[in-house]
Amino acid sequence: MIWCRRRISGSWQSIERVNTYTGYSAYYPSIHVDSGGSRVHVTWSQPPSGSYYRRIWYRSRPTTSGSWGTVEQVSPSDMNNYSQYNPDIWAMNNGEVHVVWYGPRNGNTRNNIYSRHRNTSGSWDTREAITSTTTGYCYRPHIAAEPDGKLHVVFYGRLLSSYYDYYYAKGTPPMAKDVGVSSILSPLKEQPGRGS
C-alpha cells in the first residue's frame, strides 16, 4: 500500500492511505508538492483489479485541509497488457502535473520512457514518448520542470551504445520522440544486456 503522513506546523498528522485498491501490492511511490505549497501530488505503480500488469496511477490532496481526490490512471489503455514502472512526478504552481515512467506498449515491447501531462482543467493530454528505441532499453526516469513549463528528464539505459549509461532529455510538451536525448555521463562499464 502507499501511505502518506503530513507534518504541519511541527506536528505529524494521521497516517493516510493513498491507493484505494488493496488486491495487489503497490510500488514506486513518488511525491511532489507544487511550488506554492498548496497541494500534494503522488504517483505509483500497481495492477488494477482483474489484471497482473502494473499501471501508473495518480492522486492528490490539499496540503493542509480537505481530502484526497479521485485515483486517476495515467498510463493509457494501449499499455494495459504490459507492466509499467518507476513513475516520477513534478507539479507546477498553476496546477499542471507531469508524470514520467518506463515500460512497453502495444507496437513496441521494449522499455521506453514516456511522459504525460495533466492540464489545468484536470484532463490528461496524450501520452508522449521521450524515447522510441526498438533495440535498446530505458529505465528509471526522473523529472524536473522550469516555471515556463520546460521539462528536464534523466534516465538510465542502453540507447546510444552497447553500454548502459545515463541520458538527458529536455523539451516543452508535447515532447517529440528522441528530441534532445543525449548521453551525459561516460558509459558505465557493464556488460551489454545487463539492467534492472
Image (cartoon, grey):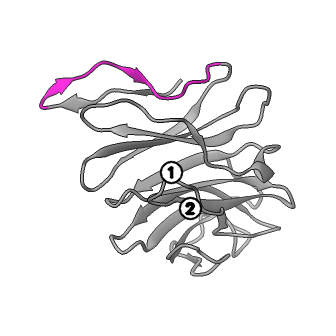
Q: Residues within 10 Å of mark 2 (few under 14, many from 20)?
A: some
**Disc on the earlier residue, 2 or 1:** 1
Residue with the mark numbered 2: 155
Which numbered disc covers residue 134? none
The quarter holding residue 182 reads bottom right
Question: Could you tell me which residue is drawn at 38 percent across and 56 percent down?
Answer: 95
The quarter holding residue 73 reads top right
Nearer to the camera, 8 or 39? 39
Q: Is residue 190 above or below residue 169?
A: above
Q: Magenta stretch: dominant SS?
A: loop
Q: Is residue 156 above or below residue 1?
A: below
Which numbered disc covers residue 88? 1
Q: Residues within 10 Å of mark 1 (few under 14, many from 20)?
A: many
Residue type at the position of mark 2 = Phe
Residue situated furthest front in the rendering: 121
Q: Is residue 185 above or below residue 90?
A: below
Label 2, label 1: how many angstroms apart (C-alpha)?
A: 11 Å
The quadrant of the rendering that contains the N terminus is top right
- Are dots 2 and 1 in contact, CB under 8 Å? no
Residue extent of the magenta highlight: 9-22
Q: Position of residue 110 (x, y in %)?
A: 79, 58
